[in-house]
């Protein structure tokens, strides 16, 4: 199998509402692709030339365009961005909020097999076309809709509220310690987002005190024990990355050090939340398939948790980030609060999580999130993260989740080892 | 710099309460909110917390009245004066606080345009170095611009530290500006707005107010048309700003700061804009709960329903923006020979020229005009307008073709203008 290099990429400013700007998905795609090509020093002419040899392809991650913007057939939509995409192989990939990762997986695979030299992976979602209640119902399609979402207001906050309850039940964690940990997770994500000029919440105010003020008018309960501060945002946005083959690197970027994809993991847990919990009862992990996807990625990369300098995790809710901490192997399952309260996962900590701000701070345009995480791994490893650059960032791991931790996707991106 | 306790005087005003919220949240400082009456102070606390959407800061907010000034000032590191924009009112407050101030307290005024040098004369020579202007924009939670103004007496080291504090702790976009009437943001913004008002009068037979607003709508790089903005700010506030500039400056655009007679008349009739129910526009409620927006028709001196103007140039630009073809939109604007397109184009050009001029006059960097307009008004930054037209060379050519007579050396102003640090795309709305 061939090596896969990451040439670079771009994301849109997640603060923006494309509905308020009156702009269509074509404007969104045009912007993210224009910027991505500029970042990577590629041009539409390069794409045309590569396509003559059938050496370029596009992979689009998106969850719910048919609902949010009445648009399907999303691979072909790129032909509206520029004529250069006429004839370029392109299709849409979907796995709920892990759609971006399925597109990445497909693109990475096509480089590994040697079919293409240049792959553009784009993830996007426009979610501000409807109000939060209608949008919440749309997102219910990431669960078993008929059973877990029909007629239920905000089904996903409820499912992740239940995850919080199940964590408490399984590990007998003291509730005050657990809720404090969730508030700390929220506050870390918000404060990290302040360093990220493309994050949605960079101007917002959050503090531990505010995150702990659950039930107040300014931090209302959303579902179960989770309040507004425990939830990720409704976001419009897109992210794009360019992957290249070793052959293309040799030809064009011979002396340049480029981050490399070191491993992946992909596991699918039972779709229905109740079945997940029943299945995981005998297991020490509450989300065993999430853990398995992480272990698969470590094994494929021949790395362990001690080799990973930073993580991007799927904090759609604080309870999901909480559970992923042990899945990474940072603590034993049930002891996640130790890493959180001791400061390990903070920006200056020994295992920083979501220095981008994550889904809570940076934003969560669902179909874009996987690609945005991958882009952040690239930025850190290639030392292009600006104000949120970490000192040590040789290897980064991302975990992107679809549904109630149903689809679990992990990628490890790092510096190429030179022997 | 450690700022732990702040006294805000005039804390029940729009800016006073919201700025208290910014200090108490991002700054995590204890804030004494001083008002005339205790009930106003209690209300102000609620408003402050709401303005940053965080009741958790309420513990930091302490309602107080002028009777408590001594205690408040004694405990404070910074005193922020936010009383009404009247030099006598401000001086009265200073007279009250001067005997209470011991050394090393920072004193700042939140004035939006009065002279910092003139205000600083209220203080003794020992206190003068500690006095400066910090001009927040409204609402400060989303408009992060902060204009910082030193007087000729201000201690430079202290001033630098305060700027750093505003930037790093309060997450403000701090722009240092000279002590010049209305400072930089309002100078540029109200030059534009007031000139659109004058054009509304000139073109009153074409529709006037809503006609000009349709020509310079959101698609020209703003989230609200200019005369809607004036209505929103209040015609009285608008007048105070332009009168101050008109009286105390004499630049090439001097006459554009003179408020047209129809607007003066509306002010006399107490039709001040949104806050008084009617002004340039008014909202007419229906029994079914919906509203119709009416506009003041200058020609007939009556309110009427707004016209649904549909100019081909505007339609074309909006269509291009909708699909992200920004370049095409500007090409079509330049090519269109209609009166409306020409008014629009000329306003955009004049906006850039006046911004460059004002940046030199009032700012310390050419980028200042971009910062103030983007983060204080949410308008397309002037330098990025040049980029949107296709760059400096193209922009110069367009100006030549327009044959604008502005009584200023445009060539000199446009020499060595750098590219903007801002992206123009988010500012250009497709509606």
Image (cartoon, rainbow, N blue to C red):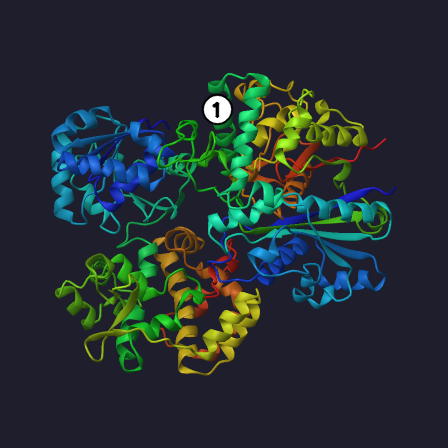
Q: Is residue B176 left or right of residue A353?
A: left
Q: Residue at x 69, y 33 (%)?
A: A397
Where is residue B2? Give x, y as percent: 36, 26
Residue B354 point in image, percent of width and height = 37, 64
Label 1 environment density (alpha carbons within 10 Å; few <14, some 14–19, many ≥20):
many
Q: Position of residue B390 (x, y in %)?
A: 55, 67
Q: Which residue is painted at 18% across and 47% down in the image?
A: B84
Which residue is found at the position 60% from the left and 47% from the top?
A141
* Left or right of A391 in this view: B135: left
What residue is shown with label 1? A179
Q: Is residue A398 above or below residue A372?
A: above
Q: Chain of mark 1?
A: A
Closer to us: B337 or A256 = B337
Question: Is the residue A82 above or below the residue B208 in the image?
Answer: above
Q: Looking at the image, which is closer to me, B322 or B193?
A: B322
- Which quadrant does the N terminus of chain B fall into? top left
Res. A241 visible in picture: yes
Give left or right: position of A58 versus B368. Answer: right
Which of the 4 quarters of the picture holds residue B149? top left
| Tally of marks | 1
Image x and y of residue B157, in percent: 36, 34
A18 left or right, relative to A313? left
């Amino acid at each position: 199998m061939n090596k896969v290099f990451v040439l670079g990429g771009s994301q849109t400013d997640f603060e923006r509402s494309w509905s308020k700007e009156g702009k269509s998905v074509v404007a969104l795609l045009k912007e993210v692709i224009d910027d991505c090509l500029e970042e990577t020093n590629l041009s539409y002419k390069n794409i045309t030339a590569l396509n003559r040899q059938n050496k370029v392809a596009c992979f689009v991650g998106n969850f719910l365009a048919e609902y949010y913007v009445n648009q399907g057939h999303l691979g072909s939509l790129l032909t509206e961005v520029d004529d250069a995409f006429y004839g370029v192989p392109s299709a849409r990939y979907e796995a709920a909020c892990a759609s971006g990762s399925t597109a990445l997986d497909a693109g990475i695979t096509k480089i590994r097999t040697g079919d293409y030299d240049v792959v553009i992976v784009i993830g996007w979602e426009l979610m501000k076309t409807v109000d939060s209640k209608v949008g919440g119902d749309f997102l219910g399609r990431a669960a078993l809709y008929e059973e877990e979402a029909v007629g239920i207001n905000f089904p996903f906050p409820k499912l992740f509220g239940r995850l919080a309850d199940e964590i408490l039940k399984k590990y007998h964690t003291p509730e005050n310690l657990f809720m404090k940990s969730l508030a700390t997770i929220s506050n870390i994500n918000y404060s990290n987002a302040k360093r990220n000029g493309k994050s949605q919440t960079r101007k917002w105010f959050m503090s531990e005190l505010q995150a702990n003020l659950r039930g107040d008018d300014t931090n209302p309960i959303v579902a179960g024990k989770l309040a507004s501060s425990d939830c990720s945002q409704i976001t419009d946005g897109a992210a794009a990355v360019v992957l290249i083959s070793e052959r293309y690197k040799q030809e064009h970027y011979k002396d340049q050090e480029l981050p490399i994809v070191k491993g992946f993991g992909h596991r699918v847990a039972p779709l229905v939340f109740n079945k997940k919990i029943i299945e995981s009862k005998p297991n020490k992990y509450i989300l065993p398939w999430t853990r398995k996807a992480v272990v698969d990625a470590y094994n494929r990369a021949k790395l362990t948790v001690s080799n990973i300098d930073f993580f991007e995790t799927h904090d759609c809710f604080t309870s999901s980030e909480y559970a992923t901490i042990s899945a990474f192997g940072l603590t034993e399952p049930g002891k996640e609060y130790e890493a959180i309260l001791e400061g390990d996962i903070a920006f200056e900590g020994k295992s920083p999580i979501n220095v981008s701000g994550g889904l809570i701070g940076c934003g969560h345009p669902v179909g874009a999130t996987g690609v945005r995480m991958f882009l952040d791994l690239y930025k850190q490893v290639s030392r292009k993260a600006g104000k949120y650059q970490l000192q040590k960032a040789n290897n980064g791991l991302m975990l992107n989740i679809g549904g109630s931790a149903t689809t679990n996707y992990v990628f490890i991106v790092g510096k190429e080892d030179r022997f | 710099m450690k700022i732990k306790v702040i006294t805000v005087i005039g804390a029940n005003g729009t800016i006073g309460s919201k700025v208290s919220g910014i200090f108490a949240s991002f700054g995590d400082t204890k804030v004494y909110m001083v008002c005339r009456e205790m009930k106003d102070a209690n209300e102000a606390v609620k408003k402050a917390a709401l303005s940053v959407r965080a009741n958790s800061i309420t513990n930091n907010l302490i309602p107080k009245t002028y009777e408590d000034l001594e205690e408040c000032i004694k405990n404070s590191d910074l005193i922020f004066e936010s009383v009404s924009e009247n030099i006598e009112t401000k001086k009265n407050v200073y007279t009250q606080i001067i005997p209470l101030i011991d050394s090393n307290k920072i004193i700042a005024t939140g004035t939006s345009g009065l002279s910092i040098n003139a205000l600083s004369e209220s203080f003794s020579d020992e206190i003068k170095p500690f006095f400066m202007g910090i001009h927040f924009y409204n609402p400060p939670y989303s408009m992060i611009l902060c204009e910082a103004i030193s007087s000729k007496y201000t201690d430079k080291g202290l001033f630098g530290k305060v700027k750093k504090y505003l930037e790093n702790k309060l997450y403000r976009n701090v722009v240092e500006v000279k002590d010049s009437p209305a400072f930089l943001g309002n100078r540029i913004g109200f030059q534009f707005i007031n000139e659109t008002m004058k054009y509304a009068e000139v073109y009153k037979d074409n529709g006037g107010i809503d006609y000009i607003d349709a020509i310079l709508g959101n698609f020209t790089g703003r989230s609200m048309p200019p005369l809607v903005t004036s209505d929103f700010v209040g015609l009285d506030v608008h007048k105070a700003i332009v009168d101050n500039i008109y009286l105390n400056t004499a630049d090439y655009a001097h006459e554009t700061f003179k408020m047209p007679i129809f607007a003066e008349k509306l002010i006399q009739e107490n039709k001040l804009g949104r806050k008084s129910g009617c002004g340039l526009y008014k909202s007419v409620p229906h029994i079914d709960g919906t509203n119709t927006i009416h506009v003041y028709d200058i020609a007939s001196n009556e309110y009427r329903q707004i016209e649904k103007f549909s100019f081909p140039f505007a339609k074309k630009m909006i269509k291009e923006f909708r699909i992200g073809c920004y370049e095409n939109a500007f090409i079509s604007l330049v090519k269109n020979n209609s009166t409306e397109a020409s008014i629009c184009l000329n306003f955009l050009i004049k906006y850039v020229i006046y911004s460059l001029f004002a940046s030199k006059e009032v700012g310390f960097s050419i980028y200042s005009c971009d910062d103030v307009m983007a983060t204080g008004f949410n308008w397309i930054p002037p330098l990025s307008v040049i980029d949107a037209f296709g760059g400096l060379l193209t922009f110069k050519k367009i100006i030549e073709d327009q044959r604008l007579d502005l009584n200023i050396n445009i060539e000199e102003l446009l020499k060595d203008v750098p590219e903007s640090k801002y992206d123009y795309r988010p500012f250009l709305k497709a509606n």
